[in-house]
Amino acid sequence: MKPLVAANWKMHKTLKETEDYLRRLLEIIPVDPPVELVVFPSFTALALAGKILEGTPVALGAQNGHPQREGAFTGEVSMHQLADLGVRYVICGHSERRKIFGESDEFVAAKVRAAWAYGITPILCVGETLEERRAGRAWEVVERQLFAALSEGLSGPLVIAYEPVWAIGTGVPAHPKDAQEMAQNIRSWLLRRFGEKGKEVRIQYGGSVKPENAREFLGLPEIQGALVGGASLDPESFWRIAQAAGLE
Ligand code: 13P
């Protein structure tokens, strides 16, 4: 299973910045990287990024997608439209969307199912707040999120990103031991629920991953990739992180 290292740009980069970044990234990576790479630009830059990345080892991802095929949903972009652009991965249930836009577990579940329906691989984000961790409820919260999002089964390829909310954008990552324990819990849950199919799900860690600490997470036995925010905004920094995943 090749690790998946993902660059979530969030609300960053103009068209020119997108083009400069991707051209640079394509210059510095090998033709056949030891890890799978995926970049998540803003919607405004998706079409351009898709053109630049066509035929390269870097996949195109979208930061969000609406489960309905089409309709009166002002400001939304559907999974159907994303598939049309060549999007291969979509982030579902990122904590910023759960918190800022009030996305429920049920809505996240609908997104995951819609992604599969259109041939897109969902990256399902799960993670607890600091308060929940301090109360000893981290696994309970993550299990609830998993249960809700996957209640109707595993009908396609899946990536799970464990992103503790308190580690996102703070510069303070989780302790690798805690990330490993959570990843192990997630894997056991997947195996109990989906049997053999649960083995094929890649589990990423996300939250203040940087080139300096990437190896601490990407070297863990149950972690097969990273979902990177801030440190993915520079192509050199992103590639340094990805290289840490490719080390045996
Ligand atoms: P940071 O890497 O900036 O902490 O963000 C993580 C994240 O939210 C990726 O989806």
Image: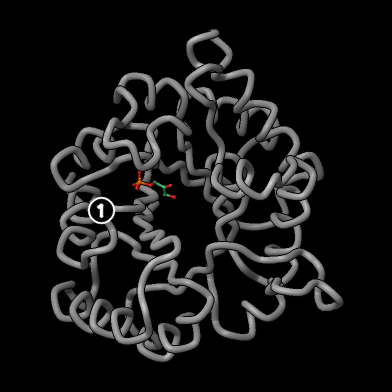
| Among the 4 quarters of the image, the one containing residue 135 | top right
| Among the 4 quarters of the image, the one containing residue 85 | bottom right
Residue placed at 76% from the left, 44% from the top? Answer: 153
Rendered-image quadrant of the C terminus: top left
Residue type highlighted by circle 1? Ala
Q: Is residue 237 left or right of residue 159?
A: left
Residue located farthest toward the right when viewing the structure as drawn? 72
Relative to 121, does residue 230 appear above or below in the rendering? above
Residue placed at 52% from the left, 23% from the top? Answer: 185
Where residue 152 appears, as percent x and y from the top left, is: 81, 44
Callout 1 secondary element: helix
Q: Is residue 18 left or right of residue 76?
A: left
Q: Is mark 1 within 8 Å of ligand 1?
A: yes
Where residue 202 appears, as percent x and y from the top left, is: 47, 46
Where residue 157 appears, as percent x and y from the top left, is: 59, 56
The residue that label 1 is drawn on is 231
| Among the 4 quarters of the image, the one containing residue 214 | top left
